[in-house]
Image (spheres, helix red, strand yellow):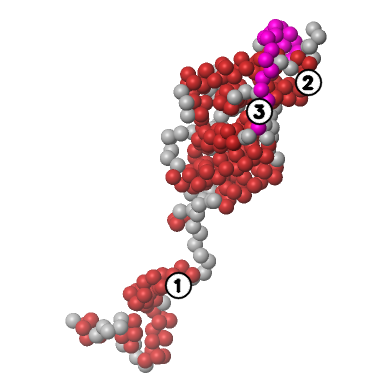
Amino acid sequence: MALERLFDACEAVGPAPSEDFLARLVADAEALLPPPPLRDRPREPGFGWLARFFAASGLSGAAALGVWLGFVMPDVVGTMATDLAGDDSALLTTFLPGADLAALDQ
Amino acid sequence: MDRHASRTADDADGAPDEALLVAYANGDAAAGRVLVARLGPRLFRYAARVLGDPAEAEDVVQESLLRLWKTAPAWRQGEARVSTWAYRVAANLVTDRLRRRTTRAETALDHAAEPEADLLSAVERMTEAARAEALRRALAALPERQRQAVVLRHLEGFANPEIARIMDIGVEAVESLTARGKRALTAALAGRKEELGYANE
């Protein structure tokens, strides 16, 4: 049939979009791109995450950090505390505000 | 025969459209670029064939894909094919534009049906560009729904059930539109004897 012949001839050949137009479509897609899920976002370089931790946790976070530092860097912390207060007992007092050394011995 | 199945966007070598859309919704820009490369040219070809105007076709395609990106985060997997959804949006936008046109499209000339053999012979002698132009002008003469159905079936290669989903009508309605559209196309082509080069045969 003549019409089928025409369809077959024209099927593969049709109007094509310009490269500029396709680039605009890509730009639209990128403009509306949703953010990736939180777990997939890259970590911030350096200790920016640490600052955000403190901002979120406040005093309790500071206390927890102090205990952690005391365990991982006892020499540094001990030296610093001694320099500040003169004896080793100042270490626990400094990093456990309000705690009584005598109470810990009970 | 479903010619569309042989060149479906679910490439064997790449991810299915739906997987790409989900990836896009999760922040994957490359997935969006692949979807543009797959859907953009196909939607443009369809819209340009029905509207007969590349600039309007660009507007339709751009709006269709904008709606796709906006719906991506809420896309429910398994409910519809991405390409069908995109074509459906494009078809609705095309219909809106056709109905807004104030000037009537070319109407089919009222001629008695010419012998089929003469028409086939004329088509065989035409150049590729002449065939494309003849079909374009004949399509422009069709009522919009017939035009849409004929383009989706015979130029875009969709099967009738898929066309039914795109046009939001029943399968029987698609069959009726394509049958009437083909009869009208044949009449329109027959009405252009001089252009087709068989007026004096």
Which residue is identified by label 3? B105
Q: What's the residue type where badge 2 is placed?
A: Thr
Which residue is identified by label 2? B127
Report if residue B166 lies within the magenta region: no
CB under 8 Å between callouts 2 and 3? no
Q: Residues within 10 Å of mark 2 (few under 14, many from 20)?
A: few
Place residue B113 in its image quadrant: top right
Decide which of A106, A34 is in the foreground and name it. A34
Secondary structure of the residue carrying tag 2 is loop
- At 34% from the left and 85% from the top, the residue drawn is A94
- Specify the quadrant that holds the C terminus of chain B: top right
Residue sitting at the far left: A106
Q: Are marks 2 and 3 in one subunit?
A: yes
Q: Which chain carries label 1?
A: A
Gap in angstroms between the C-alphas marked 3 and 1 = 67 Å
Which residue is identified by label 1? A51
Relative height, residue A99 to residue B195 (above, below): below
Q: Tell me: A17 left or right of B179.
A: right
Q: Visible in this render: residue B135?
A: yes
Decide which of A78, B173 is in the foreground and name it. B173
Q: What stretch is highlighted in magenta?
A: B103-125
Gap in angstroms between the C-alphas marked 1 and 2 = 72 Å
Q: How far across and down, in percent of the image, does residue A17 sit? A: 68, 38
Q: What's the residue type where badge 3 is placed?
A: Ala
Relative height, residue A22 to residue B108 (above, below): below
Q: How far across and down, in percent of the image, does residue A50 sit? A: 44, 71
